Image: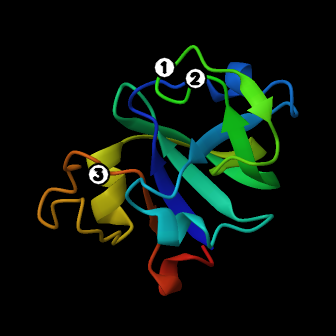
Amino acid sequence: MSFLVSNIGDRDHQRIFSDISSGAFFDLSPKQHGWSDYLQVRLNDVVYVVNNERRVEHGFRVLGIVDGVELEADDVWGEKVRSVTGGNLRVLFGEPVEYVGMDYSEFVTNNGIASPKLNPKTGKMYPGFNCVKFPQDMASR
């Protein structure tokens, strides 16, 4: 399967989660939009990341998933890992496998991605967008 996630806040996943492993590229908690889709991410899936310039530059192959991570300062981006158990974060680790280089709204419309947090006509994100699974027919591309 394929997924689209938003890191427009430029969260430094590699730095925050370096104590666990290298290659961290996204994390999400149950209170954030898209959690039910995010829970469907499996090893070898491809996850496309919207960056702080609102572009999708790469698709990442998921090589590792760590569930239950707890951070020391959950609401501040100076976080560091407190524990790999007892928390509620799900962290994805992987490597870039596809270069996209496209504005995210164009990527959304080109791939038929739909979410209550995406404008269906323009592909633009509404506040709170975090993760969405691609339509089934697109997941095997």
- For the residue pair 10 and 39, the one nearer the viewer reads as 39
Question: Where does label 1 land, which residue?
Answer: 76
Q: Secondary structure at mark 2?
A: loop
Q: Are marks 1 and 2 in contact (CB under 8 Å)?
A: yes
Counting residues from the N terminus, which is met first, the one under dot 3 or under dot 1?
1
Establish if 71 lies above or below 38.
Answer: above
Q: Residue at x 75, y 48 (%)?
A: 86
Q: What residue does disc 2 label?
A: 73
Residue at x 71% of width, y 65% of height: 45
Say which label, 3 or 2, has the lower sequence index.
2
> Residue under circle 3?
106
Q: Please tell me the numbered disc located at residue 126.
A: none
Report, in whole angstroms, how far the alpha carbon at label 1 lies from the one at label 2. Answer: 6 Å
Q: Is residue 13 above or below residue 45?
A: above
Q: Is residue 80 above or below residue 110?
A: above
Give the residue type at disc 1: Val
Horizontally, is 9 left or right of 42 in the view?
left
